Amino acid sequence: MLFKGEKVSLRKMTMEDTSIYHKWQNDMKIAPLVNPFIDMLSIDEVEESLRGMLHADNRKNYIIEHLKDEKPIGYTGLFNINHYHKNAECYIAIYEDGYRGKGVGPEAMGLLMEYVFKEMNMHRLSLRVFAENEHAIGMYKRIGFQIEGHLRETRFYQGAWQDSYIMSILQEDYLT
């Protein structure tokens, strides 16, 4: 366990997480809200993807575990980490039923942001979110992210074009 809050902890994702990651990537209730590529993936495809993620120099990937149940409930992490410009992009998804809307997402993001801004000393953390994911947008705003860009028609899904937002938080905003 790397980071621990009151409800959740974050631990490094490993190849041993392939089966749960496979389950989550093929969860058609949640995947369309967070994944730009909506395809059913084989276990081999997920294993190859996970191996690439875990070996990338500019990524950090974490499993979110619920402390009370000691159960993996989702994942979060960083990608496009740029130490020279002191910025990174992040992602989060809570996949397991019964845990969404219970404060675990904001807490997991809080643990990640504390690491990003206090340990890594990054200046900026950003993310992309589909405009239809109003629940996530509200959560990101509550924890300090601001919408800084509106990307029109970034994905064609269920017969219609959908927009995305770029949201970010700066280190100075997080620390104040």
Image (cartoon, rainbow, N blue to C red):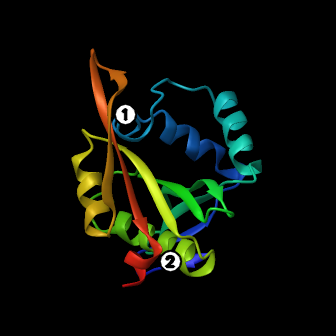
* Rendering coords of residue 21 (x, y %): 57, 44
Q: Quadrant of the C terminus?
A: bottom left
Find the distance from the CA under tag 1 to the CA under tag 2.
28 Å
> Residue placed at 66% from the left, 28% from the top?
45
- Name the residue tied to disc 2: 114
* Rendering coords of residue 53 (x, y %): 68, 46
* Rendering coords of residue 77 (x, y %): 56, 58
Q: Is residue 98 visible?
A: no
Q: Secondary structure at mark 1?
A: helix
- Name the residue tied to disc 1: 32
Q: Is residue 121 visible?
A: yes
| Between 153 and 94, the one nearer to me in the picture | 153
Task: Using the rendered view, name the quadrant where residue 69 is placed.
Answer: bottom left
- Amino acid at circle 1: Pro
Q: From what the image shows, is residue 64 above or below residue 16? A: below
Q: From what the image shows, is residue 26 above or below residue 71? A: above
Q: Residues within 10 Å of mark 2 (few under 14, many from 20)?
A: some
Q: Quadrant of the N terminus?
A: bottom right
Q: Secondary structure at mark 2?
A: helix
Lower position in the chain sequence, tag 1 or tag 2: 1
Q: From what the image shows, is residue 36 above or below residue 96? A: above
Nearer the observer: mark 1 or 2; the answer is 2
Q: Which numbered marker is on residue 46?
A: none
> Residue placed at 49% from the left, 42% from the top?
24
